[in-house]
Amino acid sequence: MSKKKKYYVVWKGHKTGVFDKWNDCKAQIKDYQGAQYKSFETFEAAKKALEGNYFDYIGKSKSFKSDLSQAQLKKIGQPNYNSISVDAASSGNPGIMEYRGVDTKTKKQLFIQGPFPEGTNNIGEFLALVHGLAFLKNNDSQRIIYTDSKIAMSWVKKKACNTKLARNSKNEKLFELVDRAVNWLKTNTYTTTIVKWETKAWGEIPADFGRK
């Protein structure tokens, strides 16, 4: 079965526009701080999106209908909207990576970092979670924090980033953030409750970049 064609919009990059090949899009966002991009299924949708605002499109996904039974959904319940949600996106593993945190209910973006030229989704999820913990502590907030990554939760608990990605000149700045995150965990205490986002019941986490 052939892979479905996609069209890539670059709102901010070395060059902006609609590109019909991922490598062409990648060339525009590589080493560009604060690059803004997203894929679309048709050229018409991509062209329309280019005329709009990046933040009106990221995190937008198809309507979700859970496959869980009513009994399972009842047991899980609804999300706690007195919370923030964090997530990461990586184009390749390793590949271009970024992460962000949003208000769970409104999806208002609270922070974003990247894109970094070489990272992994697990590193991004870990950094997003630590960034979220620091954000809530700095704002003296009692909100909980959602993540859809069990790996990130375990790394935070162990106060270690157990990635297999090797350090090199390409990802030096990313690993500087990793070092800062690990040091923050080792030198700070927090009361924030970390909760696993129930994707099968609620759909994609609100901080999702909507690029799947």
Image (tube, rainbow, N blue to C red):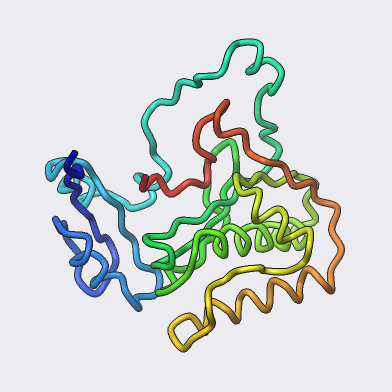
Tell me residue 211's x, y (percent): 36, 48
- Give the quadrant of the N terminus: top left
Query: In the shown orientation, is residue 134 left or right of residue 105?
Result: right
Which one is in front, 196 or 46?
196
Tell me residue 39's x, y (percent): 27, 50
- Residue in the picture at 16% in, 56% down: 18
Tell me residue 137's x, y (percent): 78, 59
**Image quarter for residue 96?**
bottom left
Tell me residue 190's x, y (percent): 84, 58
- 42 w.r.t. 123: above or below: above
List the single residue furthest toward the top: 70
- Residue in the picture at 52% in, 52% down: 109
> What number of labels is visible?
0
Query: In the shown orientation, is residue 118 left or right of residue 163?
Result: left
Query: In the shown orientation, is residue 109 left or right of residue 27?
Result: right
List the single residue furthest toward the front: 1
- Residue in the picture at 87% in, 63% down: 189
Which one is in front, 85 or 123?
123
**Image quarter for residue 186?**
bottom right
- 148 w.r.t. 98: above or below: above
- Residue in the picture at 53% in, 41% down: 206
Which one is in front, 76 or 190?
76
- Give the quadrant of the C terminus: top left
